[in-house]
Amino acid sequence: MTKVFNEPSFRDGVNLMVDRAMAVMGLDDGVAKAIKSCNATLQVQFPVKIRGKIEVFTGWRATHSTHRLPSKGGIRYAPYANQDEVEALAALMTYKCAIVDVPFGGSKGGLLIDPSQYSRDEMELITRRFTLELIRKGFLSPSTNVPAPDIGTGQREMSWMADTYKHLHPDDINYIACVTGKPVHHGGIQGRVEATGRGVQYALREFFRHSDDVKNANMAGSLDGKTCVIQGLGNVGYHAAKFLSEEDGVIITAVIEYNGALINDEGIDIEQLKQHVDEHGGIQTYPCAEFVEEGNAVLEKECDILLPAALESQITMENADRINTKLIVEAANGPVTFGADEILRKKGIVIIPDAYANAGGVTVSYFEWIRNISHIRLGRMQRRHDAMRGEEMSRVLEEATGRAMSEKIRNNISRGADELDLVRSGLDDTMRLAYQEIRVTRDNHENISDLRTAMYVTSIEKISRSYIEVGVF
């Protein structure tokens, strides 16, 4: 007899996880309700003339919290976009910003569309029309609500949005800060494209710096040599897999895509695979791994690290019992349902939760927003000063030791940090400190044993302090 699993919706699942944390805290019901409530949700429907016919598109923008301004969160274009998903993602953004100390509220947007069915010019027309609706309703502004790329959107869409805002507000000198994730030549910042994947790498590195946490996950040692199954070879999954395999020695034994999976226990070359996908349009004909049509079944493949980087609700009550990994890193938003989370915790599988693990994107978006508001490139004022100090230090060391430095060492000491160096440094520091805060919360509460609950407790404590400070309660 087939089992029937009655799981809550994505939004309800997020709220149930938050409820679990609030129960541990003993938070007042009124305070809890205020923190969980979605502040506002906008639904728009707008017509666009496409190929001689009028099409009506539906889009949403949810603002979960305005305890900090602006509210921040991506906009996704997808044929499955809906209000429940948008509100759940907006809530996650609130907790995500709090856990990494980014002073934004949480927001998220979605447009019900399949981008593959439209040309570039048609997508520009649709995006500019959608942007116009958001601006008119007060849901897009550098001071109140700042979108970013998500599934189905990227630098191109952000450029169109920023340009549309500029034409409607020609006197706003901060117009370029109305969105993040823009191309570098159009007000973006170095390192934003790969930021979420890089953040996943830094989160894993920090986890492996704590031997007791590694032991709790039934592992030992460093990342080097650990096996990893990746779901999703989009922007996040590709960069996370590339950095972990090339820089940390992680062996990518399987890659799962929407239409199948690749398996090679000796390891998959991610850059080679990416080039193959770009040339051939998919993973099916990749010659250096075994192709499996039932991709989702590969989620159950034995590995040290399972890294879901695709969509929400991939590990559910239906397959959670068969998951055979030691550590799950939620690179996607909500890949593990509430019911599955309960099963996995009982099995002893450690989960690094989404609101922390994939916070690299919003962290670097914050750096970009600061860059735009301050109207100066990061590192511009101090880079040469740092380089001259380094050069002077090299001369002092040579005089003190009586030995000449190699050119390589001299260059390393005297090189001033550029924008990309500062972005990576800031992101690394952010991910380290956030994980350490989560650990302290977990270790200081006898009723908390998992990282997800500790993460939510840490976030909620910060958010509630913000409300208290402004006199909301």
Image (cartoon, rainbow, N blue to C red):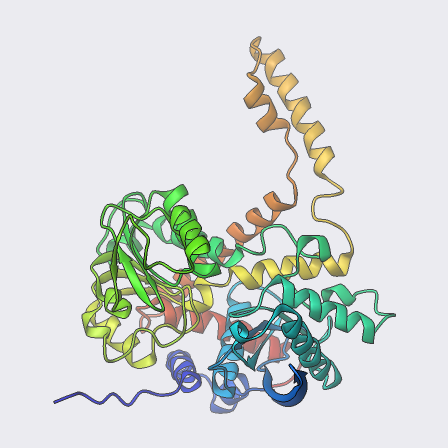
> Is residue 414 shown above or below 433?
above
The answer to whether 273 appears left or right of 251 in the picture is right
Residue 438 as seen in the image, left or right of residue 289: right
Residue reaching furthest to the front: 52
Q: Report the residue at 23% width, 80% height from top.
A: 318
Quadrant containing the N terminus is: bottom left
Instruction: Give the quadrant of residue 444.
Output: bottom left
- 452 and 285: which is toward the camera: 285
Taking 378 as reference, is 410 above or below it?
above
- Residue 61 placement (x, y as % from top left): 60, 82
Left or right: residue 191 compared with residue 291 = right
Residue 158's quadrant in the figure?
Answer: bottom right
Nearest the eye: 242 or 456: 242
Q: Nearer the viewer, residue 276 or 256?
A: 276
Q: Quadrant of the C terminus?
A: bottom right
Q: Residue at x 64, y 27 (%)?
A: 414
Task: Answer with left or right where residue 169 lies relative to residue 111.
Answer: right
Image position, residue 110 (x, y; %): 56, 79
Residue drawn at 67 percent across, 56 percent down: 188
Residue at the spot 21% in from the left edge and 56% down from the top edge: 218
The answer to whether residue 178 is seen in the rendering is no
Instruction: Give 55 or 35, whichever is nearer the viewer.
Output: 55
The image quadrant that residue 8 belongs to is bottom left
Determine if residue 382 is in view.
Answer: yes
Where is residue 345 shown, x and y percent of the image? 26, 71
